Amino acid sequence: MMILKGLLYLAWFVFEQSKGNKVEDITIIGAGIGGSYTGWRLRNKGLKIGIYEYSDRVGGRMFSKSFPDAPDLPVDFGAMRLRPKDHVRMIKAGRELGLTFVPFPEGGGRIPERTLLYMRNTHLRIFELGGPRTPYSLRPEESRNPGDLSRLLSETYSNYNGTNTNVELFTATTIDGVPLYLQSYTDVIQKTGISLEARRYIKDNNLFQSGFGPEQCLENFPKARRGFENIPIQTGLPPFVTVPTGMNSFPAEFMRQFLLSNPIRHTLTMNRQLVKVLRKNKGLYQLKFRETISINGLIIPTNKYCYVYSRNVILSIPKVPVQKIQMPQFSNPQFLSALDSVLDVQSSKIFLIYNYPWWLGGSHNFTFTHSDLPYRQSYNWGISRTGKAVLLISYTDTHDVPFWSRLQNTGNIISKRYDETRVTDEVVKQAHLQLSRVYNRHVNSIPDPIDGMMFVWNKYPYNGGWVGWKPGSRWYDIKRYLTRPFLQENIYINHGYWGAEHNGWGESSLEAADDVLSFFNIPSYLQTN
């Protein structure tokens, strides 16, 4: 009987192959940082592995491009820097891949001596915040640096110490006894009784607007009390680094090495959207893919479908694409609740290139600006060996993103390409108007850019540049559950959206992948030589 079953399985296997249906040991959905890393770590296991990508590019939210006039200065629309003390897997992998790390000049932003603030039509330096020139009507007890004010509120209105973060975040409470993790930032800030002006002051002076509204308060309210701060981790690298070839070098090199390690058994298929998973006999899953086409960065679904059979399925894709997959188990209420525990945060970046760095010069070389205007942040991106200068003229999130998204589709295109990174003259006009106020110069004195690129993270499949947790989310429980949500199924999720304290970071995608790979008896990357 066993021999007969074996022969029947062999006959079925040959039949499926003859129809052109692939049969794989592991199928990875998504060719972003998580999917490419997973394939890379499995590359020497002798398995038949296929990676399938919805679009026509590898990298996901690690998305780099170069201006023709500055080929040595790639711009990053998504991830653009690493913090070595937190991105330990990324740093280790980068070294193994042969990538080079260089300091990210602006660090995490707002380096005091290089930063110009422009709030409520007032030019400020960071050391002036909380002083008499602060353009907010603050009460006497609120008139302090916004970081110090936030720490005071945390120390006064919660019992959080910061001594054991992973545990304490989910046991600490506000003074009324309600656990912090159950509350949004809006909930807890209202309990402090501070003025509306002080709330605006704190939010305006944060680099990002996300985390100061309906999101879980754990991102921005709890502050380690003085004396309980963590001891800095020594990495031998600057506090912030980047990759001079662009952050997309990570997934691109992961993928290159994965494919080269076994060209026959390892494949990458672009323009495929997983729409349905059906469990078949013999421990296999039938995967139904819709074919897509890419036109100038726009991904268009077609009416063509193809099928793949696989023993294991690893989903390395964001929340919304997972929610769209048809599979009976995916209607499980616990599963749906876990998926929906995060909120997508829209974001956008705009890069313009000029013949010279008009924003530098004078008594102060302000290489970073921060404002309450819609552009929010600007970074001196650098000067190319061609002599051309690149400015990240806008980096913003949440409420300001629709403003720039609308302008991208208004006016005449000034870019040297017509794709999803195009920039229009209306985008340039508004950016120049805002930066002219910040730099206190007439808008007509700002030269025209010679090219531009921008990207808005508000469309499928990403729906945002990163995510925030919803109130009530217990990060580690959700992360552990989603790694393999149905113990009787070989379906895994390794996307960093649900990566605990670093959800949405590249590091969290690698950590989530390590969690998945443990089911295949592969040790954590941090435990390997």
Image (spheres, grey):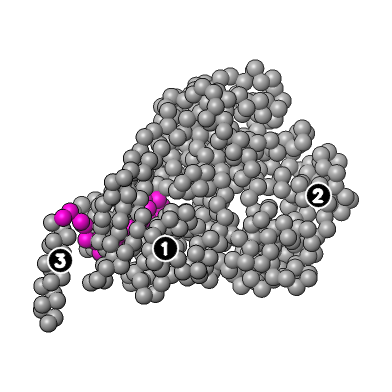
Give the mark toward the camera: 2 or 3. Answer: 3
Give the extent of the magenta segment: 19-36
Badge 2: residue crowd in 10 Å (few <14, some 14–19, many ≥20): few
- Position of 320 compared to 190: left or right? left
Please state which amino acid type lies under the numbered disc 3. Answer: Trp
Direction bottom: furthest residue: 1
Q: Which residue is mark 1?
A: 493
Task: Tell me: residue 134, above or below residue 318.
Answer: above
Q: Which residue is mark 3?
A: 12
Q: Check disc 1 and report its element: helix, strand or loop.
A: strand
Direction front: furthest residue: 303
Give the mark toward the camera: 1 or 3. Answer: 3
CB-based contact (under 8 Å), mark 2 and mark 3: no
Q: Which residue is mark 2?
A: 196
Please state which amino acid type lies under the numbered disc 2. Answer: Leu
The CA span between labels 2 and 1 is 41 Å
The CA span between labels 1 and 3 is 29 Å
Residue 139: % across, % down:
88, 50
